[in-house]
């Protein structure tokens, strides 16, 4: 994929994100984009408000390099760092940020990463089973397929992809690797087509959820998400806002549960005469139900179709 193609990458729910996180065009904001990607959201933040200073974080060094060029117009207002978004607090401290007024988490793989065949994120391309967002890490999708137990694989497919018949798929993967190790995307896609139930008309292709589950396992995305939200809440200045865009029910469930608990004063079991937990709400929910993309956006960018955004404000 060339630079021009990457620049055409469309940030999901752009208008809604800006309106919630940057409501005042003239106010100074310290913004953290924890999932910088190819700079789509960050570019719009910086263009909307000349008083914004931005810290961008991404695990993918190629995304960092591309965003550096894309955001060159605001070079004196940005700091770009490679790292996990679960390390946001440590990264902020390292660069001298003690707080933030707005934080964005746009979870999942970006469109340019999907379209880079050699990354192995998509079954549409013949490529190595890699799926690493940070290619310095050693764990790949092929290693998981070649070394995990049947129980471990079934857990990944059931819990991270909500795949139907996860045990049957896991057993077939282990049986096949006795003859030949798993190496390429098309091999796994073919097995999924053979083993998994055929999708309903208009439904997702059979390998989609399987590939999603492996990507989440390789990059430890759900654990990262939970850890990072609590750190972001601590990092937010009073009145600061956090927006999380997720793309499947597992991610959204984590965000919903954390936002609900952190916007509630008492977490004691029902029936106790007095509160004994001492928990105090830290957040105010700005979206009681998740926001989704408009029909117009979905028509322009079909990959936005499953997006859900939740926003909360630090008390």
Image (tube, helix red, strand yellow):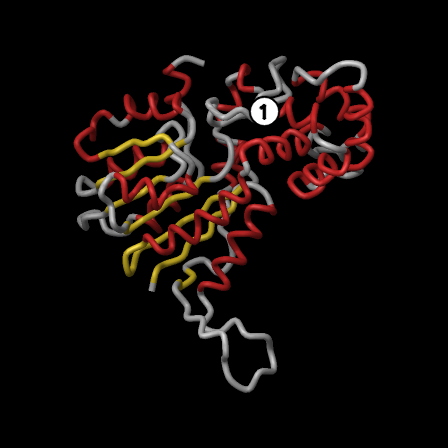
Does the rendering let one see residue 244? yes
Quarter of the image where one finds residue 143: top right
Percent across and percent down for residue 146 are 70, 23
Residue 3 lies left or right of residue 249; in this view the side is left
Considering every residue shown, the one lying at the far bottom of the view is 273
| Residue at the disc numbered 1 | 140
Front residue of 120 and 276: 276
Quarter of the image where one finds residue 248: top right
Q: Quadrant of the C terminus?
A: bottom left
Residue 108 lies left or right of residue 148; in this view the side is left
Q: Residue at x 39, y 46 (%)?
A: 16
Percent across and percent down for residue 64 are 35, 26
Quarter of the image where one finds residue 218: top right
Residue 94 lies left or right of residue 166; in this view the side is left
Q: Is residue 83 above or below residue 250?
A: above
Percent across and percent down for residue 128 are 60, 15
Q: Is residue 217 above or below residue 16?
A: above
Q: Quadrant of the N terminus?
A: top left
Q: Is residue 275 above or below residue 308?
A: below
Front residue of 276 and 309: 276
Q: Residue at x 77, y 19 (%)?
A: 177
Does the rendering let one see residue 112? no
Element class at badge 1: loop
Percent across and percent down for residue 102 are 31, 49
- Count of picture labels: 1
């Amino acid at each position: 994929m060339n630079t021009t193609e990457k620049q055409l990458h469309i940030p999901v729910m752009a208008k809604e994100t800006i309106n919630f996180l940057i409501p005042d065009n003239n106010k100074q904001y310290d913004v953290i984009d924890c999932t910088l990607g190819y700079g789509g959201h960050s570019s719009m933040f910086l263009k909307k408000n000349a008083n914004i200073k931005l810290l961008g974080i991404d695990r993918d060094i190629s995304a960092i390099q591309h965003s550096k060029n894309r955001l060159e117009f605001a070079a004196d207002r940005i700091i770009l760092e490679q790292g996990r978004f679960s390390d946001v607090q440590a990264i902020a401290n390292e660069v001298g940020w003690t707080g933030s007024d707005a934080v964005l988490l746009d979870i999942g793989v970006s469109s340019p990463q999907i379209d880079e065949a050699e990354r192995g994120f998509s079954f549409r391309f013949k490529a190595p089973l890699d799926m690493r967002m940070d290619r310095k890490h050693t764990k790949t999708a092929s290693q998981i397929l070649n070394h995990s137990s049947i129980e471990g694989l079934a857990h990944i497919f059931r819990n991270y992809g909500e795949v139907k018949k996860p045990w049957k798929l896991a057993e077939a993967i282990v049986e096949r690797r006795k003859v030949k190790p798993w190496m390429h995307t098309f091999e796994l896609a073919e097995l999924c087509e053979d083993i998994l139930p055929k999708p309903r008309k208009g439904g997702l292709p059979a390998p989609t959820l399987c590939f999603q589950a492996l990507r989440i396992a390789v990059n430890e995305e759900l654990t990262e998400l939970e850890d990072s939200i609590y750190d972001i809440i601590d990092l937010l200045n009073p009145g600061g806002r956090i927006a999380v865009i997720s793309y499947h029910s597992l991610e959204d469930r984590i965000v919903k549960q954390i936002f609900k608990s952190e916007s509630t004063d008492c977490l004691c079991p029902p029936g106790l005469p007095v509160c004994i937990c001492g928990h105090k709400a830290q957040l105010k929910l700005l979206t009681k139900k998740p926001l989704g993309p408009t029909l117009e956006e979905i028509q322009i960018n079909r990959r936005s179709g499953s997006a859900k955004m939740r926003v909360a404000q630090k008390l």
